[in-house]
């Protein structure tokens, strides 16, 4: 049972590291600078973006996700008294240091925040209507750099191969069969 678990963990690490290496070298993990007008259609397959041509306004603070992390939610400016429709939601954890008025660097990873239904309810309470396709940008986050991805890949291979080698050696030592 432990052998199977270790091999599966090794394979997951290997696949994740390989995916990260390919993405960092050939595309989706590279910083893409996208004007706010172009982001209305979505950001495509980008995983790391910088949105230009807008600022942000905070619409909810102290929103509690399901895993107990407090989030801060921002929308693209301008915020008016009229009901706001948006396709861009910027978010960060409450303890993080992100300046809500720093329009020069609205960059981060494209990822859904934890507790999406609660987040949608918090935005509705703040008078924000989401318009498809919605892009969630985790402000200040960056993808893992390629050396860490390579370490995950090699560590995964090493874990799986070592587990199997130990099992193979142990099995053949007990049976007396040489390979």
Image (cartoon, rainbow, N blue to C red):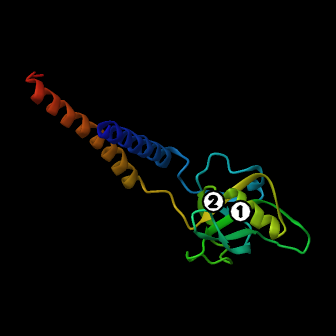
Give the class, few, some or many, for how many residues have Cα within 10 Å of label 1's Cα (few <14, many ≥20).
some
In the drawing, what numbered circle is on residue 113? Answer: 2
Image point (81%, 71%), residue name? 126
Question: Which one is in front, 157 or 118?
Answer: 118
Image point (42%, 40%), residue name? 15
- Could you tell me if the residues under marks 2 and 1 are in contact, i.e. CB atoms within 8 Å? yes
Q: Is mark 1 on a helix, strand or loop?
A: helix
Residue 150 placement (x, y as % from top left): 36, 48
Question: Which one is in front, 64 or 162?
Answer: 64
**Spatial separation of the CA atoms under disc 2 and disc 1:** 8 Å
Write down the residue under mark 1.
119
Q: Quadrant of residue 141?
A: bottom right
Image point (16%, 29%), residue name? 171
Residue 4, compared with residue 48, is above or below; it is above
Give the class, few, some or many, for how many residues have Cα within 10 Å of label 2's Cα (few <14, many ≥20).
some
Image point (78%, 54%), residue name? 40
Residue 2, compared with residue 34, is above or below; it is above
Residue 121 placement (x, y as % from top left): 77, 63
Q: Is mark 2 on a helix, strand or loop?
A: loop
Q: Quadrant of residue 168?
A: top left
In the drawing, what numbered circle is on residue 30? Answer: none
Q: Earlier in the sequence, mark 2 or mark 1?
A: 2
Question: Which one is in front, 175 or 77?
Answer: 175
* Quadrant (top left/top right/bottom left/bottom right) for the C terminus: top left
């Amino acid at each position: 049972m432990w052998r199977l678990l270790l091999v599966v963990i090794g394979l997951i690490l290997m696949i994740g590291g390989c995916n990260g290496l390919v993405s960092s070298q050939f595309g989706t993990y590279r910083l893409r600078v996208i004007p706010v007008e172009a982001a209305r259609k979505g950001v495509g397959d980008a995983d790391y973006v910088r949105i230009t041509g807008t600022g942000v306004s905070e619409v909810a603070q102290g929103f509690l996700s399901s895993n107990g992390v407090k989030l801060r939610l921002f929308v693209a400016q301008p915020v008016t008294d009229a009901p706001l429709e948006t396709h861009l939601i910027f978010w960060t954890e409450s303890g993080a240091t992100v300046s809500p008025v720093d329009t020069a660097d609205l960059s981060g990873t494209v990822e859904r925040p934890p507790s999406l239904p609660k987040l949608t309810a918090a935005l509705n309470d703040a008078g924000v209507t989401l318009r498809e396709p919605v892009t969630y940008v985790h402000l200040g986050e960056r993808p893992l750099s390629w050396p860490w991805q390579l370490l995950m890949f090699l560590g995964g291979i090493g874990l799986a191969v070592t587990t199997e080698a130990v099992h193979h050696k142990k099995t053949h030592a007990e049976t007396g069969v040489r390979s």
